[in-house]
Amino acid sequence: MTNDLDIFVGNTTLIDEDVYRLWLDGFSVSDAVTLRLRSGILEQTGATVDVLQSDTMDHYRTFHMLERLLHTPSKLIHQLHFQIPPSRQAMLIERYYAFDESFVREVLGKKLSKGTKKDLDDISTKTNITLKSCRRQFDNFKRVFKVVEEMRGSLVENIQQHFLLSDRLARYYAAIVFFANSRFETGKKKLQFLTFEDFAYCAEQMIENWTLGAVDSNVDDMDVDLDKEFLQELKELKVLIADKDLLDVHKSLVCTSLRGKISVYNEMEANFKNLSRALVNIASKLTHNKDVRDFFIDLVEKFIEPCKSDKWTLNDVRLFLTQYMTSAHTVDAFRHQALWDRYMNTIKSCLLKMYHD
Amino acid sequence: MPGKLKVKIVAGRHLPVMDRASDLTDAFVEVKFGNTTFKTDVYPKSLNPQWNSEWFKFEVDDEDLQDEPLQITVLDHDTYSANDAIGKVYIDIDPLLYSEAATVISGWFPIYDTIHGIRGEINVVVKVDLFNDLNRFRQSSCGVKFFCTTSIPKCYRAVVIHGFVEELVVNEDPEYQWIDRIRTPRASNEARQRLISLMSGELQRKIGLKVLEMRGNAVVGYLQCFDLEGESGLVVRAIGTACTLDKISNTAFLPACNSPSKEMKEIPFNEDPNPNTHSSGPSTPLKNQTYSFSPSKSYSRQSSSSDTDLSLTPKTASSPQGPRIFLFPSSPTLSCGSPHLNKSCLLFPGPSLNPLHSSHVSPVVLRKSVSFTEELLLAASGMGSGSAGKEGGPFKALLRQQTQTALEQREFPFFTLTAFPPGFLVHVGGVVSARSVKLLDRIHNPDEPETRDAWWAEIRQEIKSHAKALGCHAVVGYSESTSICEEVCILSASGTAAVLNPRFLQDGTMEGCLEQRLSWQPGFFSIGSEKGEVDFFPQNQDSSSLLGTEETSPLGCGFCHIPYDELNMPFPAHLTYCYNCRKQKVPDVLFTTIDLPTEAMVIGKGCLIQARLCRLKKKAQAEANATSISNLLPFMEYEVHTQLMNKLKLKGMNALFGLRIQITVGENMLMGLASATGVYLTALPTPGGIQIAGKTPNDGTYEQHISHMQKKINDTIAKNKELYDINPPEIPEEIIGSPFPEPRQRSRLLRSQSESSDEVMELDLSHGKKDAFVLEIDDTDAMEDVHSLLTDVPPPPGFYSCNTEIMPGINNWTSDIQMFTSVRVSRLSNINLTNQTLNKNFNDLCENLLKSLYFKLRSMIPCCLCHVNFTVALPEDEVIQVTVTAVAITFDKNQALQTSKVPAAEKTLQRASTDNEEQLQFPLELCSDPLVSQPFSPAKAASLDKASPLAEGHLRHRSIPSCTNSSVSVVKMTPLSFIPRAKITKYLGIINMFFIRETTSLREEGGVSGFLHAFIAEVFAMVRAHVAALGGNAVVSYIMKQCVFMENPNKNQAQCLINVSGDAVIVVRESELEMVPVQPSAPVSQPTSAGGDVTT
């Protein structure tokens, strides 16, 4: 005797969070049953494998039907088809849009195109995340990107409104959209030590300070694209390294204030010019898309790695960057104070976040 | 008398993309009622159109208002080709036709297409203006209220219970008309949906007319069913109980003369709180209490009989509204003769005692008819004060005659109610059922469905005579059903034979008027332990003992007492003295189709008991088929009964409530499924155990095996007793004074076969004359039976189940409920089926289904599955479909052991404590789920709007956060007549919906499971949407009456028909209610305030 049809429909849609997780992780029904068996659920409930199988199938069917709605979460909230308490709806959405760290690190900054989608097979093998789950995560990125790409207003808030995500997750998506739009390179070997969280933080800083939205909240793509004018202006900062006097004054100001405070004073003093050149060069090159993409690599190669090799502590870096930034204000011949702050505040935050002890 | 129907189409949302090129839709709406159609403008290029139409006005007859559904069609405009239909919404406007229900229908309805399912939603507002004054209004059947609930609805009281109403209409099934060959499946489905909608409207209107004829204003326990007879047509039939209901409101304390009952002649009645006057003196409640009922005397009773008053306590006197019921026979013309009638009954008390064997023959239409009475309950009327002796005989006969006279004047003294106010039900006789096998042929003239009418009349007649044989004059908990396979149809009817309170019935007859009157306090209609209930009983009991009539026992055992003369029993029965009052006789087991009466004294908890049975049958045609089915039926009934009895004993219980036996016919088999709730009634004797006896006593190993089995059975009984808390106090035999030292089981199946002769075949269910209940293992069959007994696994810890409204022993429900429907279709794999393997398969199917439910609902533990309703269908050869609908309710474990009659003070405490818990839960939820409140908070949305002055350009985006707060309103659904921890404040009307869903891409929709899963979810959604549009927040007495599923996997097709019904209501949570000050006099003798409607 076989069951052709076996369904359970509750007036309030029954959602098992554990099964939902398995479904999101892309396991097939039979794999999910095996995993549930391993969790010892049968011993706890006295059920049989058949029951577990039927229950899992049932949940999978429900999730499959819900998936269509999850693509536009506002539909899930308003639809009449499934009666789901608001807290559960929020859970469904939040989990559906959640992603794996290892996956997001693979695609962060890549173009969310069909080409990348084809590479999901490799990513799946590499990260040990099922292809199904990879696809869901990739499609989520792409879907969010498409919806908010051309939209006015705050990126985070747009995402939150359209996808009803928690603040934290909305910020992460903002970072993903921002990175995908500017195509920042994050996959190079040298960048592997950085977590998604690091990048998300940097993205947030950059969105806050370097995009159009930072100065004007009434433009298209305000949070997605970097402020072109600002990038142009950054060339002006070159004076800090091009003018030898300025460079020396700057150096002496920094050294004076850091003497005795920083543990790597000698190294700092020796390296000051290199470091300053690196930071200012990064700024001046940002008008080229190629260099924008290499922004993080440059930060690592030109600043983080030299400091690391000299065994700077995070505190040393903080002291240095703070002094480096503020001292520029006291350099009389330097006139781009506002520009300098807009640039350096973000750079400092990013570097500090990226500098792992 | 015309009315004006007004419809406004507001907006649509989430429409499907109809134009692939633009990914958008140019939608417009057609609004159709009767033959009139209006259209909205086309709202171009949007999936969220805002039509905001004018009011479309239809001027129509009220007959049309009742019959026709409002039909709303959403279409996609296409300039070059025909407009594509997106989907439809049918709105039943009946709830707008009576003043107390909904006043407006307004809300979002899912747009439904029979091929694609739900495709977006549409916002509609519907109003009705009736151009008539109340009087004229009452002349039509428009004002009649319908309730699916099988008890008096919570915020009403019954002024009169008139009795049984039935009607059926037939038509050709559009699916089988010639035109179906050339039209699309969609057109065919829609024709069918529309037809059935029309037919239900017509049926309801016709029933309404009957009710008005009886001077009622409502139908309670309304059950409407469809018989899809295929080629021969489509039958829609309904039964119900006509009542005159009076809304309990704050003015309930006013005299009842403003109730509709004043239209009836007996105005003095209304002032009289005590109808109970046949005994004029303060005589002792002993035996030969003369039963004086001279008409003149009784007429003057209102002033004279103060000593017999049940309600002349000061408090009740001050509230003379005297909640009362008039039983109003359907044939009022007999009124003039009734005093004589009474007399004649006195003179000839006999005839009702032996009608059991008089089988009726229906000569022409009926090809074959088999019918049964199961006297599962043996009962004789207990005389007052323990004098069940000879003196009692005539007196009882007299009483019975009296009440019978009253009820006999109606054609069918049936009540579809399953729960009654205390005191209404005097004795319960047992289950009566009748079945009849018919061959269907085409209904030639749809306007005169005489054949079908005659079939049912026949069955009802049989039920009536069975009830008489049990010494009962009425049938309660009555229901009818059919099972159809090809051209064979089994009609079934069943109910519980009962004696209704003669005190309530007699005075009407004596007065030469046919109004019988029942009086009780209206607050007691409610199920569950309302305050004041306990207080009521002493009164009742006082009066009864004073009167010396048969009366509800103070111990709540009255209904168990046998309703007929012990010395004149229609069948051999085994009786003992009641274990509660020790005065009157009770049977040792009691089977009924009703809910457990609230006054019943129960030990421990109840449990769901099922008997399952399959019988193979040869494939045959027409009459041969009908004959073989008829021949099988008695054996099935017998076996089902035996199984129930065995399982009941195995549980250590002695009574079944809510018994429902379903016999399903298929091509090559018959299925029997009986479900009931077993309980241990204190009034009935402790059930004996089950003895196993072998046929070959000399075989040593065999003996060993037998004793092993016996041990297993005994262990199971002991385990069950522990599980269900059944620990009755040991009562020494002497105290009981029973002349029968041992409880014995005997019951008997009486069968009348109308076709061949009047010969009566009797089946003795008592298994010979053995002392205990003995199972003989003489062959493998019997072995299987014993095994199957033991294979029923008890539910996992924390779970209980029942198929009745209330679960005895559990009364502290929380508001956490989950209604569900589960469907399984199983294909029997092996071709060479035997009865045994079939039985086993079926048993496994049901057991696994239950196990699966327990697993799914494990998060609700401790929890009880209530109103578990199984239905079996045999859609094809070797395919069994089982559908279960039930509600799971979580209860509070800590208070689980309290008895059902909690003192009022304690109860409020209990309530308060749970309220606290609820309050605690709320913040907890908040912190565990911070995402809920944050992203959707209105403050945030507002600030957003402020922050970005570009709102205009992006209005569509902006509008979303503003409405995220107004999320879809929650609608609870339950098959019960109440929502735990909440109070029904208003009934908004009946929900009766019929849907068809078809697919030609079965695999793409996830196979049969995916298809049906989605469809049932859609049905729920549409029911919820309709309820919400009526302004309601819950559906009670929800039932899925039909779920017909057909598939053709080869063609990648499937079709399903679902019919659901229920009562749309507004409920208010108890905790919210308590804000409102309660009447100070609540606990004593004013149960109206407890049961009443405090909020309105």
Image (cartoon, rainbow, N blue to C red):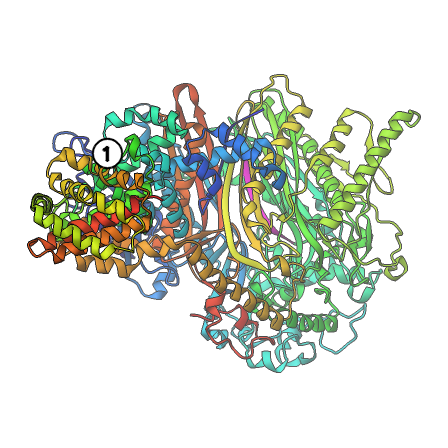
Which residue corresponds to mark 1?
Answer: A185
Alpha-carbon neighbours of circle 1 within 10 Å: few (<14), some, or many (≥20)? many
Whether residue B43 sits left or right of residue B895 in the image: it is left
Query: In the rendered image, which quarter is residue B761 located in?
Result: top right
Q: Position of residue B289 (x, y in %)?
A: 78, 70
Depth check, front residue: B294 or B1062: B1062
Looking at the image, which residue sits at the far top? Answer: B832
Whether residue B935 sits left or right of residue A148 in the image: it is right
Whether residue B125 sits left or right of residue B932 in the image: it is left
Query: In the rendered image, which quarter is residue B356 located in?
Result: top right
Q: Amino acid at mark 1?
A: Glu
* Magenta-drawn stretch, dominant element (helix, strand or loop): strand
Q: Position of residue B830 (x, y in %)?
A: 60, 18
Q: Is residue B475 above or below residue B183?
A: below
> Element under label 1?
loop
Whether residue B837 sits left or right of residue B96 in the image: it is right
Q: Is residue A62 magenta?
A: no
Q: Position of residue A356 (x, y in %)?
A: 34, 43
State the extent of the magenta-drawn residues as a range: B474-482
Q: What residue do we see at 74% from left, 32% from top?
A: B787
Q: Position of residue B516 (x, y in %)?
A: 59, 64
Quarter of the figure with the C terminus of chain A:
top left
Quarter of the figure with the N terminus of chain A:
top right
Depth check, front residue: B446 or B622: B622
State which chain disc 1 sits on: A
Observer able to see residue B223: no
Q: What residue do we see at 61% from left, 29% from top?
A: B670
Q: Is residue B759 above or below residue B468?
A: above
Q: Is residue A334 above or below residue B363?
A: below
Q: What residue do we see at 82% from left, 48% from top?
A: B574
Observer able to see residue B796: yes
